[in-house]
Image (cartoon, rainbow, N blue to C red):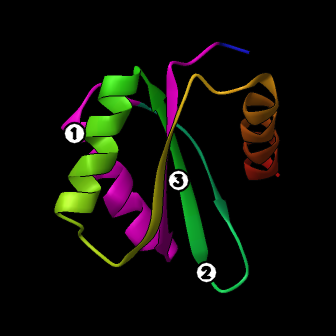
């Protein structure tokens, strides 16, 4: 597993909104798409990674000019090994 400076998380309703939000974050700063997780009810949780400043800028761009309703956002700096394992589990679920 590659070590990341930070993970950025944004929760929206719907896959289409997740794509629009991800596009905005990728254009806002130098972040990389990691994965997303969708739960019952259609809530999609998008994960990006990069330096703390880049991830913060990407998440802030969505908070300041949201293209849709954003339910929650978070920046996790210096993620723990356990957090990185959770992201890997989400990635594996996306492959199925």
Q: Is residue 56 left or right of residue 84?
A: left
Q: Residues within 10 Å of mark 2 (few under 14, many from 20)?
A: few
Residue at the image point whose x is 22% and y is 39% from the top: 27
Q: Residues within 10 Å of mark 3 (few under 14, many from 20)?
A: many
| SS at mark 2 in the image | loop
| Residue 57 position within the rendered picture, expressed as x and y whole percent measured from the top left | 26, 37
- Magenta stretch: residue 6 in it? yes
- Give the distance between the C-alpha atoms of the residues marked 3 and 2, in whole angstroms: 13 Å
Residue at the image point whose x is 79% and y is 40% from the top: 86
The answer to whether residue 37 of the structure is visible from this angle is: yes
| Residue in front for this viewpoint, 15 or 65 | 65
Query: What span is colored magenta in the figure?
Result: 3-31
* Contact flag, marks 1 and 2 (Cβ < 8 Å): no
The quadrant the N terminus occupies is: top right
Q: Residues within 10 Å of mark 1 (few under 14, many from 20)?
A: few
Answer above or below: position of 81 versus 39: above
- Give the distance between the C-alpha atoms of the residues marked 3 and 1, in whole angstroms: 15 Å
Q: Which residue is mark 3?
A: 46
Q: Which residue is mark 2?
A: 42
- Say whether disc 3 or disc 1 marks the residue closer to the N-terminus: 1
| SS at mark 3 in the image | strand
* Contact flag, marks 3 and 1 (Cβ < 8 Å): no
Residue at the image point whose x is 40% and y is 25% from the top: 52
- Magenta stretch: residue 17 in it? yes
| Residue 32 position within the rendered picture, expressed as x and y whole percent measured from the top left | 44, 30
Q: Which residue is mark 1?
A: 27
| SS at mark 1 in the image | helix
Q: Is residue 83 left or right of residue 44?
A: right
| Residue in front for this viewpoint, 1 or 95 | 1
């Amino acid at each position: 597993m590659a070590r990341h400076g930070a993970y950025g998380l944004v929760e929206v309703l719907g896959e289409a909104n997740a794509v629009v939000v991800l596009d905005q974050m990728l254009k806002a700063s130098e972040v990389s798409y990691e994965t997303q997780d969708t739960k019952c009810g259609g809530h999609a949780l998008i994960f990006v990674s990069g330096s703390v400043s880049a991830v913060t800028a990407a998440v802030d761009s969505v908070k300041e000019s949201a293209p849709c309703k954003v339910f929650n956002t978070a920046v996790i700096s210096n993620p723990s090994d356990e957090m990185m394992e959770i992201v890997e589990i989400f990635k594996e679920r996306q492959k199925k």
